[in-house]
């Protein structure tokens, strides 16, 4: 039943993107290109009845230990309780020099048919934010300043949105995705 829920979610997501015929491969994975900039991987894991979403944040880790520490601090702070990462988190494959952002959707019997369609744009937006932030940190364009966790949540929210205003884009979510 759960694999069927995942397949149904993928089909509904494909309809939203005008990419009919999205399917999982033999590894229960579907890979989509986003704006020819990065990939969104969707992998169904049958043992847990979960659909994992993951995307690369950075290819290649900084060689400078201080820069690497700054990057790790920023990523760890952002992933605290999933707050800035669409409820997910971050993982580092040191040998492969790869940083991935991930999140998960439950695909059990109670899974909604439109869960992926509703969630994927939020996840992609968070990935874009963290790809830019990581790149800017590594290139020295942005300084990492730890958040003041002692401030009330409302103040943290206001400060964040003053520093990072939302953009009103004139495209549909489906305009950005391509089947890989």
Image: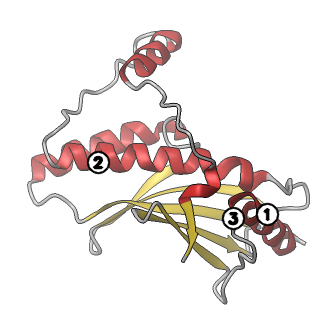
Q: Which residue lies most toward the bottom here?
A: 26
Give x and y (percent) for residue 70. 20, 42
Total count of labels? 3
* N-terminal-most mark, 1 or 2: 1
Closer to the camera in the image, 81 or 21: 21
Give x and y (percent) for residue 122. 59, 44
**Badge 1: how crowded within 10 Å, few (<14), some, or many (20+)?**
many
Q: Which residue is mark 1?
A: 9
CA separation, marks 1 and 3? 10 Å
Q: For residue 43, what is the image quadrant?
A: bottom right
Would residue 15 appear left or right of 124 to someone viewing this image? right
**Badge 2: how crowded within 10 Å, few (<14), some, or many (20+)?**
many
Label at residue 51? 3
Q: Which residue lies most toward the front here?
A: 170
In the rendered view of the protein, which quadrant contains the N terminus?
A: bottom right
For image coordinates 39% across by 62% down, the residue present is 37
* N-terminal-most mark, 1 or 3: 1
Label at residue 35? none
* N-terminal-most mark, 2 or 3: 3
> Which color scheme is applied?
secondary structure
In the rendered view of the protein, which quadrant contains the C terminus?
A: bottom right
Looking at the image, residue 145 lies above or below residue 45: above
| Marks 1 and 3 in Cβ contact (< 8 Å) | yes
Label at residue 134? 2
Q: For residue 103, what is the image quadrant?
A: bottom right
> In this rendering, which labeled residue sits more in front, label 2 or label 3?
2
């Amino acid at each position: 039943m759960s694999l069927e829920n995942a397949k149904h979610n993928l089909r509904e997501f494909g309809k939203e993107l005008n990419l009919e015929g999205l399917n999982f491969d033999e590894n229960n994975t579907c890979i989509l290109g986003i704006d020819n900039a990065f990939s969104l991987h969707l992998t169904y894991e049958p043992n847990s009845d979960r659909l994992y979403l993951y995307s690369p944040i950075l290819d290649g880790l900084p060689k400078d230990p201080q820069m690497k520490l700054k990057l790790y601090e920023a990523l760890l702070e952002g992933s605290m309780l999933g707050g800035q990462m669409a409820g997910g988190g971050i993982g580092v494959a040191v040998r492969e020099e790869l940083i991935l952002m991930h999140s998960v959707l439950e695909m059990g019997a109670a899974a909604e048919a439109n869960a992926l369609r509703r969630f994927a744009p939020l996840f992609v937006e968070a990935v874009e934010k963290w790809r830019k932030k990581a790149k800017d940190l590594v290139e020295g364009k942005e300084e990492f300043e730890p958040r003041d966790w002692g401030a009330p949540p409302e103040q943290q929210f206001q400060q964040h949105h003053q520093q990072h205003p939302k953009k009103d884009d004139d495209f549909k979510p489906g305009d950005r995705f391509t089947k890989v």
